[in-house]
Amino acid sequence: MRKNKFTALVGAGAILLGTLTTPLMAGSFGIGVAGLGLLGETDGTETLKTTSVKTSKRGVNGTGTVAAGYIQYTFGENGFVVGLEKIPGSATLGSNTVTVTDKLTDGSGTAVTQHAEAKIDNHRGAYIESPSLGGLYLKVGYSEVDLTTQESLGTGSAYGDDTMSGTTVGVGFRGTHDSGIHLKFAVERTDYDSVKLTSTGSDVASKIDADLTTYGARLSIGYNF
C-alpha cells in the first residue's frame, strides 16, 4: 500500500508539471550527492501493560549528519524540478538503559536491566522544487523510512518494527554553472506520521505512541546532463 502511494506521488507530480509547462521546454537530467545536518525532535508516550500508567517524554532531541544521493529532472533552464533521493545507512533515534525491580515475573523483587533502542534506516523519498526566482525556490516532498526497535526487557516483551511516512517542506537557493555543475542549499522540516507499537511476548501488551519531526540544513552538489 505504501509502495503504491509512493509510486503514485511520483507519477502524479510528473504529469502535473508536464501540464504546467506550456510550451514544454527541453529539460535536463541531473545526479548528485547531498550532505545533511539534522535535528530530530521526538515526543513519545508509553502505556504500561499492568497498571495502564502512562509515561511521556516530550521534546527529546538528537542531532546527526547523513549523506544522500539523488536523481532529478529539471524542466527548462530553470523550471520545476522532480527528483528521487536515497539516504543509505541508519541513525539512532534514542537509546536508554535502566535497572528496575521486577515484582511481576516471580514476585521476588529481582533487579532486572531494561534496554530499549530505536533506529531508522532505508530512507527513500520524492520531491518537487518550484522554479527559482533569483535563485530562491520552494520544495515539497514525501518520504518513507523503516523504524527498527532493539530491546532487551526483563519481562520478556519485545516491540516490532514499522515504516513511517513523512512530508517535507523547505526553502533554498540553487544555481547551475554553464559547465552543468549545480549547487543547492536548503533548510527543511519533515513531519512523520505517528507510530504506534504494541509489545509481544508477554501476558499483557504495553503500548508506545511516538511522533518524530526533523529539522535540517542540506548542501547539494551535482551535474546536469
Image (cartoon, rainbow, N blue to C red):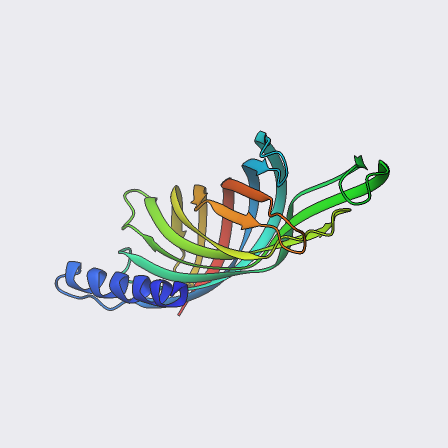
Q: Residue at x 34, y 49 (%)?
A: 140
* Quadrant in which residue 147 is drawn: bottom right
Residue 173 placement (x, y as % from top left): 39, 44
Let me know if residue 76 appears in the view. Answer: no
For residue 23, above or below residue 127: below
Please indicate whether residue 186 sits to the left or right of residue 51 in the image.
Answer: left
Vertically, is 183 above or below 4? above
Q: Check the image and name the residue furthest to the front.
A: 107
Q: Residue at x 28, y 50 (%)?
A: 130
Residue 165 seen in this snapshot: yes
**Viewer-proximal residue among 51 and 70:** 51
Work out whether residue 18 or residue 164 is closer to the camera in this orientation and state it.
164
Residue 136 position within the rendered picture, expressed as x and y whole percent measured from the top left: 33, 42
Residue at position x 78%, y 46% in the image: 154
Quadrant (top left, top right, bottom left, bottom right) of the N terminus: bottom left
Residue drawn at point x = 58 percent, y = 37 percent: 47
Which one is in front, 51 or 128? 51
Q: Quadrant of residue 42?
A: top right
Query: Quarter holding the C terminus?
Result: bottom left
The image position of residue 36, as x and y in percent, is: 55, 47
